């Protein structure tokens, strides 16, 4: 009987940490209208706080990636979770808008960026020799699972008990997860006397060299592929957690849906994204990652063009079903392309900065959504702009160098050298 591989313990704990931490990212969409009612803050002012938090969330990606590359997985998870817990405790007692900016913008933004961003890719590339795309997809699905588990409960608590109780449940979850992270997470298989999952008895020198191959951030930034990946991921952020993640619930409420129904649509979106992201991980291990990205962005653009026309429950749920399949599906092929082009040992740093571009796009969309809603009275222009950008991302993805096409994760010998 084969011994249970320790890699799966690391995956399970990481999944739970991501689930709790990334559920915090969904909280603004649930509590925006409550903050407006209690404090009289405008949608633009609240959206700016969310935008600031998304921007620092993006900075948490390269910060976390650098810490992972230098000090390991456990430290970045512990520090990130502690920042989230501290920020949420402060938010429960917030009274002034500047406090919202500071707390949501700094500890929560940076903390969720550290416990997110590059963490799943780092776990996959350190603990697995095969099935890395699926592992990245599974850990990416933790974001959706967080929505599925927490958003309906947060919405119900917001209606019945108030928005502070909604924040309280994610605060407790983030605090509890500190215990298994401290006890069970290890940086590399060697620390528990194991080898990477799927590693054969004989590992070639080429495979070992590929594990250690690095590209400096400066060197990566001199290549076209870096900017194509960063540009397409900018669009991903704009069209996902920046716009839809922040403003879908208030948009749905303004189209006549109840808060609980809108939150249920987000939960459905999250559940379908679990399916879509896992499928994307499977596809990433087998097919041209550039074409996968192009397909995902085109599919997303079409669904966003339809959103302003939806006023009926069945169509809202259909949108959530269709769009959900594509929510985080871009993560496995993007992370895989970074590893294939620039080296697995560079994933933390380089993917971290590409992830930052994702969150810059998200931050712009989060603020612009609130601004143009206050200016025009609805979100329609923003959803149309997101659809247009989605088709631009299709073009960017297809221009990534063909040298990365054969570099799929289960076959390390086929990994390409760094683009120069």
Image: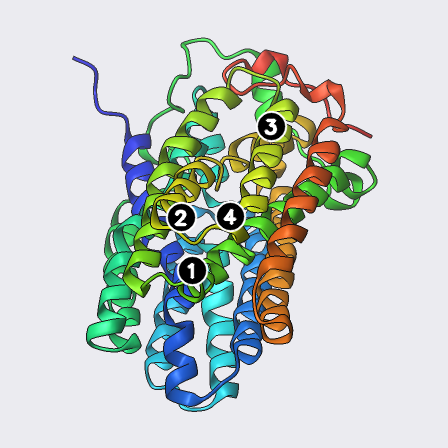
Can you see residue 30? yes
Which numbered circle lies on residue 295? 3
Badges 1 and 4: C-beta atoms under 8 Å apart?
no
- Please tell me how crowded label 1 is: few (under 14), some (14-19), or many (20+) other residues with Cα within 10 Å: many
- Return the disc, 3 or 4, that comes first in the chain's sequence: 4
Badges 3 and 1: C-beta atoms under 8 Å apart?
no
- Return the disc, 1 or 4, that comes first in the chain's sequence: 4
CA gap, disc 1 and disc 2: 8 Å
Which numbered circle lies on residue 68? 4
Residue 301 location, x and y as percent?
A: 61, 40
CA gap, disc 2 and disc 3: 22 Å
Residue 226 location, x and y as percent?
A: 74, 39
- Return the disc, 1 or 2, that comes first in the chain's sequence: 1
Badges 1 and 2: C-beta atoms under 8 Å apart?
yes
- Report which residue position mark 2 lands on: 316
CA gap, disc 3 and disc 1: 27 Å
Which residue shows up at 63% across the image and 38% down it?
346
In the figure, is residue 89 to the left or right of 220?
Answer: left
Secondary structure of residue under mark 2? helix
Front-lying residue, 258 or 162: 258
Which residue shows up at 43% across the image and 47% down it?
73
Which residue shows up at 60% across the image and 64% down it?
55
Give the number of the mark in front: 3 or 4: 3
- Return the disc, 2 or 3, that comes first in the chain's sequence: 3
Give the number of the mark in front: 1 or 4: 1
CA gap, disc 1 and disc 4: 39 Å
CA gap, disc 3 and disc 4: 31 Å
């Amino acid at each position: 009987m084969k011994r249970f591989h320790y890699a799966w313990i690391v995956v399970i704990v990481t999944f739970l940490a991501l689930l709790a931490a990334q559920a915090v990212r969904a909280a603004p969409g649930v509590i925006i209208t409550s903050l407006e009612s209690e404090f009289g803050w405008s949608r633009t002012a609240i959206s700016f706080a969310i935008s600031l938090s998304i921007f620092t969330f993006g900075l948490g990606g390269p910060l976390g990636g650098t810490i992972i590359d230098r000090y390991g997985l456990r430290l970045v998870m512990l520090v990130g979770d502690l920042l989230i817990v501290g920020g949420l405790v402060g938010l429960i007692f917030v009274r002034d808008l500047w406090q919202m900016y500071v707390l949501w913008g700094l500890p929560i933004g940076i903390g969720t960026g550290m416990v997110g961003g590059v963490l799943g890719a780092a776990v996959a590339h350190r603990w697995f020799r095969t099935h890395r795309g699926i592992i990245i997809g599974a850990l990416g699905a933790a974001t959706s699972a967080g929505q599925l588990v927490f958003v309906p409960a947060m919405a119900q608590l917001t209606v019945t008990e108030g928005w502070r109780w909604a924040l309280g449940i994610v605060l407790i979850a983030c605090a509890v997860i500190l215990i298994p992270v401290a006890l069970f997470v290890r940086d590399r298989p060697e620390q528990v006397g194991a080898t990477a999952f799927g590693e054969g008895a004989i590992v070639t020198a080429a495979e070992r060299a590929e594990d250690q191959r690095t590209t400096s951030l400066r060197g990566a930034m001199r290549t076209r592929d870096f900017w194509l990946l960063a540009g397409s991921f900018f669009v991903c952020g704009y069209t996902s957690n920046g716009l839809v993640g922040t403003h879908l619930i208030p948009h749905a409420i303004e189209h006549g849906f109840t808060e609980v129904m809108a939150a249920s649509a987000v939960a459905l979106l999250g559940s379908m994204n679990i399916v879509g992201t896992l499928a994307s991980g499977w596809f990433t291990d087998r097919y041209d990652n550039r074409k996968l990205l192009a397909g995902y962005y085109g599919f997303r653009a079409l669904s966003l063009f339809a959103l302003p026309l939806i006023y009926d429950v069945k169509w809202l749920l259909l949108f959530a079903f269709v769009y959900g399949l594509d929510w985080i599906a871009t993560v496995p092929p993007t992370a895989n392309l970074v590893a294939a082009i620039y080296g697995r040992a560079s994933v933390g740093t380089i993917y971290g900065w590409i992830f930052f571009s994702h969150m810059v796009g998200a931050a712009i969309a989060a603020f612009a959504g609130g601004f143009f809603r206050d200016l025009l009275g609805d979100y329609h222009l923003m959803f149309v702009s997101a659809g247009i950008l989605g088709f631009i991302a299709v073009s960017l993805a297809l221009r990534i160098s063909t040298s990365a096409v054969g570099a799929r994760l289960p076959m390390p010998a086929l990994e390409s050298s760094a683009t120069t």
